Image: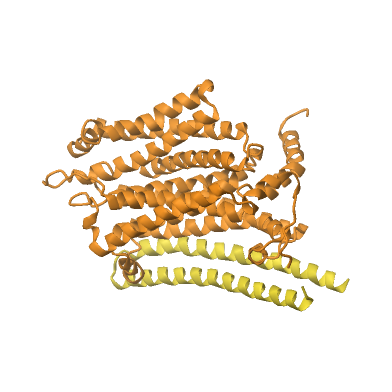
Amino acid sequence: MSKMIIITQRKIIFAAQLISLSLIWIFVIAIAFWILNLISLSIELDDAPGASIGISLIAIPVFITLASLLTYTFIGLKKDEFRLLKNSSEE
Amino acid sequence: MSKEIKQNFGPDEVLYRPIYETGKGFYITVSILIAIYFWSLYMYFTQVRSGLGVTGMNQPVTWGFYIVNFVFFIGISHAGTLISAILRLSKAEWRRPITRMAEVITAIVLAIGGLHPILDLGRPDRMLNLVSAGRLQSPLLWDVTSITAYFTASTVYLYLPMIPDIAKLRDRGGKLTWFYTFLAWGWQGTEKQKKILNKVINILMIMVIPIAISVHTVISYIFSMTLQPGWHSTIFGPYFVAGAIFSGIAALLIVMIAFRRAYHFENYLKEIHFKYLSTLLLIMSLLWFYFTFSEYLTGIFGSEPHEMHIILYKFTGPFAIFFWGMVVCNFIIPVILLGISRFRTIKGILVASISVVVGMWLERLIIVVPTLANPTMPLPAGIYFPSLVEWALFIGGIAVFILGFVLFSKFFPLISIWEIEEGRKEGIKEVEERIHSYLPNT
């Protein structure tokens, strides 16, 4: 397989990986917005907003931490892969 | 990228075999399971078209099989992430061939269990009301939040430790190389990458334990936060968590025994693994009995009329067969089979595990239905017979679980290969160092 095709395939896969990671963040942000919307609704209706805020204080950081861990792993693994690829192409 | 598959990957070749070799049995199993799935899907559309009238639910029994199965499936999900995280955290060396299967159970069963409240809604479009006008003060919404968090966490916890194995499949070549390249995230096995992955897995295993415990505690709250006799109990949280771990271990043992036989994993899943896990199962059986005894003794001692009515309904009424069946399945059978060493063979463990899974399902049934069937208001007692639609969706749920597991085994190794290799290289040294660190004069 020519080098050109391999590079293109690598780029497509990298783009797909970035999209999938973005989707995870979209999911997490959507959940955070949903919870915030429910809090504002409970404040508006004066319907025990304290309980809603209590739940959100636990739930939102959990989702953000999970997405952050995935992002940290992805960046860490990719960085090292790129470093290896660079070294091998220089050789 | 090469389309040829490299052959012979050393001593762990048998772990790759299910991915690259597909026998007749696989196609037959998958076809049967897909047929059951479509049958249950058809039944579900019947329910959507005709409404909940096609189920056995009625007034006053407004929760039936769907909620029973919801609690049951979510309970089974504790097999995976929780057990795997605890074993990893305690550095139990024998965990290595078990963790992956346990984590897969969690991810699949959570997806199935999480959908059950939608089945119970009758009209699935009503889920949208949760988005626009949900009440975060309600334990029902705590469930939605905690199950979503647990599903996300357990999927991440399943996926990240799989990366080194996915990279092995990528390097092996074949038609799906692009798929494995996509999922491997550039894993090359460098020291730096190993360090990053281990760090994240360590954080996740600590994070996942409280999330898993919170899920089943919150599920118990949908019952215990009400003032209904039989439900309003302060020990429901830990009782549900203990029951979930109990049924989870049993489900894990069944899966291990089935796939050990189907894929010839005898060299990996040895008798010692079953002995250790079955000891845990036995301990959980005793713990379950202790909780059940405490729960009912408190109710009987108080002799509150409504509470006593529900207790007698379970002990001697129409639900007596299910109640005593539950005691036999969850306590008597496992204690006999696992407590007497002569019966503690793989066959005995399998029978005990199946018995526990059945018993835990019965427990969910006798928690949900009797309280609803005996309203505290002056209304006649209700009766509940599940309809064919409900049975179909229950069987469909089990079929989807098996299908998910079989399909997973077609794409990914069911036993973590890199963890086995790591155990061979570093496990003995690590254990030796640990022994030196806490034993004097060694």
The reply to whether residue B209 is visible in this rendering is no
Q: Which part of the image, by quadrant, shows the C terminus of chain A?
A: bottom right
Colour assignment, chain A: yellow
- Front residue (pair A62, B83): B83
Q: In the displayed structure, would residue A87 be above or below residue B341?
A: below
* Residue B91: quadrant of the picture: top right
- Front residue (pair A91, B302): A91
Q: Is residue A40 left or right of residue B7?
A: left
Identified at 24% across, 58% down, the residue is B52
Where is residue B340? Give x, y as percent.
Answer: 50, 21
Q: Is residue B79 left or right of residue B13?
A: left
Where is residue A5? Give x, y as percent.
Answer: 73, 77
Colour assignment, chain B: orange
Identified at 49% across, 27% down, the residue is B338
* Residue B315: quadrant of the picture: top left
Where is residue B310? Give x, y as percent.
Answer: 22, 38
Where is residue B332? Give x, y as percent.
Answer: 40, 26
Identified at 46% across, 61% down, the residue is A59
- Front residue (pair A24, B200): A24
* Residue B230: quadrant of the picture: top left
The reply to whether residue B13 is visible in this rendering is yes
Q: Which part of the image, by quadrant, shows the N terminus of chain A?
A: bottom right
